[in-house]
Amino acid sequence: MNLNAIDTLSETMVNRTTEPYVQLHDVAHTYRIPACDKPPFTFGPVTLAIKKGEIIVVIGQSGSGKTTLLRLISGLERTSFGMCRVNGSVLFDKNSFIPPEKRKIGMVFQDHALFPHLTVKKNILFGIKKMDKKFQTNRLHELTDMLGIQNFLNRYPYELSGGQQQRVALARSLAPNPKILLLDEPLSNIDAELRNNLAQELKSIIQQTKTTAVWVTHDLNEALDTADRVLVMNNGIIEQFDTPWDLYRHPKTKFIAAFIGNASFLQGHVSGNHIVTEIGTLPCPMQYRQIPVLEVMLKPCDLSVQQHTAGIGVLIKKQFLGSTFRYTISLPSKQTVLSDMPPECNWELNTRVAVNLCISEAVVFPTVP
């Protein structure tokens, strides 16, 4: 092999290792809901890159395009706009379309979608029943041991709890070693007290199997707790795609700030290098110093509150959340802010409080006229 061929081969190998594992480029889709007078829903255009082994959690309001994204990747929904590639193979573009059954994609649904007439064992082996018997046996033992369902192999789905059914559904989806795993609200039918533990269990299994996953949920806590990165959909487009921490502390839009983490917004006036609000002063980000009025994002944990007869705040709403009380505080300007306080701060409504900022940097947005 000559040197030029070696250089070309090396460059190709580098490109393969650095390019995203899942790529969507300018994917768009429009459809009308049957028997509905609403205008057609437009999805996209969406451009997205996912690394191999990442867990991407998709959240957004109902009708924002979360499930449409999964259906387009899986091939259950067909579009002629844009391109989708997984592990270098094109799933669809304007000239080609790989049918769903040939995409090697696993899916986990909210209703589990187990075959009621098949045992747990036969459900798990359904997608690999044409493969070598030794592979089937090894894969069955590997997954059932990993998921803790090895004692249920001869049971039928109706004999299992919701959590056990979801573990079986996950084992069935992982059995063929899918290129990518798509999960559509996998825990929505699980009791609340089991949901957090099962979410962590599913995350651990997906990580152990080194599977790339796209996971749709309505549960914000589930998203922040399980995702490597969170994708927020809004009206068919990506509003922000970021790590849970950056999404929470550094939202790029006011929609994200309000959607993630119960933010309130306090108006402030720019004075030199600072933003002056009625409860304190913060450094103003450089790019906003020429804007006279801004809105400061405040999370419930960003405020320090104490009872004080001369305080400027008044408690007008109180929510008991178990480990905290969440108070809505009215300020002299009639603006309101939220604050989370420990259980011992069990104060009456209309109590006057002193309100202070306990953050050192501001996340701000221009005031909308």
Image: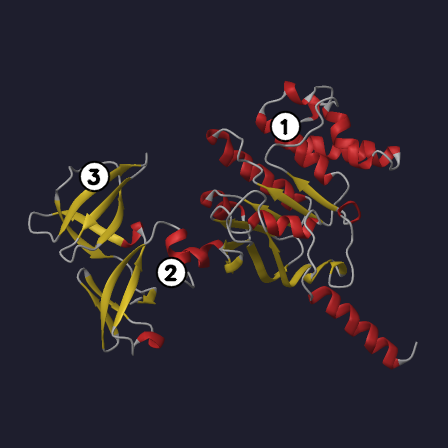
The Cα atoms of the two marked residues, 1 and 3, are separated by: 42 Å
Numbered circle sitting on residue 165 = 1
In terms of depth relative to the viewer, which is nearer, 126 or 285? Answer: 126
Above or below residue 309? Residue 7 is below
In terms of depth relative to the viewer, which is nearer, 32 or 194? Answer: 32
Name the spot of residue 118 as percent of width and height, x first.
75, 23
Quarter-wise, where is residue 366 in the image?
bottom left
- Residue depicted at 26% across the width and 57% down the height: 358
Above or below residue 89? Residue 9 is below
Quarter-wise, where is residue 246 in the image?
bottom left
Q: Which residue is mark 3?
A: 345
Disc 3 marks a residue whose amino acid type is Cys
Disc 1 marks a residue whose amino acid type is Gln
Quarter-wise, where is residue 334 in the image?
bottom left
Q: Which residue is mark 2?
A: 254
The Cα atoms of the two marked residues, 3 and 2, are separated by: 30 Å
Disc 2 marks a residue whose amino acid type is Lys
**Which marked residue is nearer to the observer: mark 2 or mark 1?**
2
